[in-house]
Amino acid sequence: MADLTTNFIGIKSPNPFWLASAPPTDKQYNVERAFEAGWGGVVWKTLGEEGPPIVNVNGPRYGAIWGADRRLLGLNNIELITDRPLEVNLQEMKAVKRKWPDRAVVASIMVPCEEEPWKKILAEVEDTECDGIELNFGCPHGMSERGMGSAVGQVPEYIEMVARWCKKHTRMPVIVKLTPNITDIRYPARAARAGGADAVSLINTISSITSVNLDNFSPEPSIDGKGSHGGYCGPAVKPIALNMVAEIARDPETAGMPISGIGGVTTWRDAAEFIALGAGSVQVCTAAMTYGFKIVQEMISGLGEWMDEQGHATLADFQGRAVPNVTDWQYLNLNHITKARIDQEACIKCGRCYAACEDTSHQAITMSPERVFEVQDDECVACNLCVNVCPVEGCITMETLAPGAVDKRTGKKVDPDYANWTTHPNNPMSTAAE
């Protein structure tokens, strides 16, 4: 069996699946149920400083986006950091860590952007004997209006400054949680590294309004006829998260920096994709809130079985393997030619491929009176739209033309040297082109 044990910046856990800082990690009862179900670690819901209590709304806190089958695709939340007393949270964290020493327990923290509040809470958190801290620089609602959360995460200089304070005042590993509500994720990641942070985690939620009630014209969730932007998460944000993780993993200034991947992880495959792009652990929230804590058992078994099939003994065997294959558009091989192919036996004759191609693409699919759909190679540009709209998996595939074959669309032979695109004279970015 594959070994799923994880050592992320010195924080050990039996598997890479951690619960993210969110409602599922707000109290000892929840966290212990999670550990009983098999989760490798938790990031405790964000702690704040002692003082005026955090007051959440007593109305709907979540908005949602659903697929056609009512499957939850995304959640929007307007909930703030923990509204439980700091002392109670700290006591429970200490009790949990002592009872479950093999699991990762990380404290998410957020206090005003001044050194003394950070110094004070760090000492209090360190006393719980937890494994590390995660600086919440990503919350896009409620706390950001108070100069915390994404208000800090959007300013690289603040990230570097606070990370430096935390490294100065604690022995614990420091993870900086980054906000996606920024133009270029590389700059805050670079700032975290410059401040001495041990790792980054991303992405936090995306600022969003999921819907508008057309009866009272209030954004959802609606509180007494008013709504606010909230944080968007769930399967719908995974592509954004993967891209941002990849940008940090391949940036020369942050390459090698440990990453905890967050954003839409619902299956073992999602987790494997984050790890392949460099993540050393993954954090989950929406999937647990949708399906319950036991979903981790499917993630663990699925990832382990896939690793066994692929011959990966440990997570390190494939961690970061996809990073070298992420490149900028101008370096893509323009001599690589593919064409769509339709499996007539698998085709159910729905006509989606034809409608999509005829109306919105390149008119490369014909339809006979008997509703037989065929690809015209001389019109097909291999856009892949037909593959994506076909309801039958594997019915339409893309076939690569072999070097030397004639592309009927252009009348030219496929370049036998297309594999060497980086230095090919047809590549406008190559030195040979100059």
Image: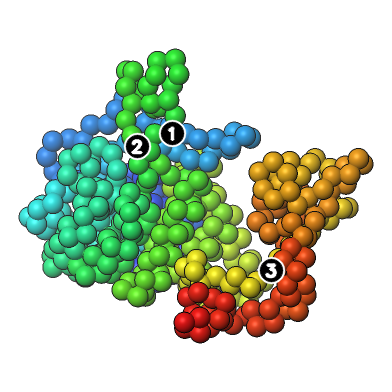
Q: Residue furthest top?
A: 215
Q: Is residue 125 left or right of residue 427?
A: left
Q: How is the image coloured?
A: rainbow
Q: Residue at x 13, y 51 (%)?
A: 113
Relative to the observer, which residue lies in front, 42 or 63? 63
Question: Mark 3: which secondary structure?
Answer: loop
What residue is drawn where x is 79% and y is 41%? 351
Q: Nearer the viewer, residue 179 or 58?
A: 179
Q: Nearer the viewer, residue 390 or 90?
A: 390
Q: Residue 337 bears which disc, if any?
A: 3
Residue 307 position by quadrant: bottom right
Could you tell me which residue is drawn at 50 percent across and 66 percent down?
A: 329
Image location of residue 126, percent across then percent down = 20, 61
Q: As drawn, which residue projects farthest toward the left?
A: 116
Q: Which residue is mark 1?
A: 210
Q: Are marks 1 and 2 in contact (CB under 8 Å)?
A: yes
Residue 230 marker: 2
Q: Amino acid at mark 3?
A: Ile
Q: Given the image, on which type of amino acid does mark 1 rest?
A: Thr
- Residue under the image location 45 percent in, 18 percent down: 214
* SS type, badge 2: strand
Is any atom of residue 365 visible in this view? yes
* Neighbour tally class for label 2: few under 14, some 14-19, many 20 plus, Cα within 10 Å: many
- Crowding near the residue tagged with mark 1, few <14, some 14–19, many ≥20 C-alpha atoms within 10 Å: many
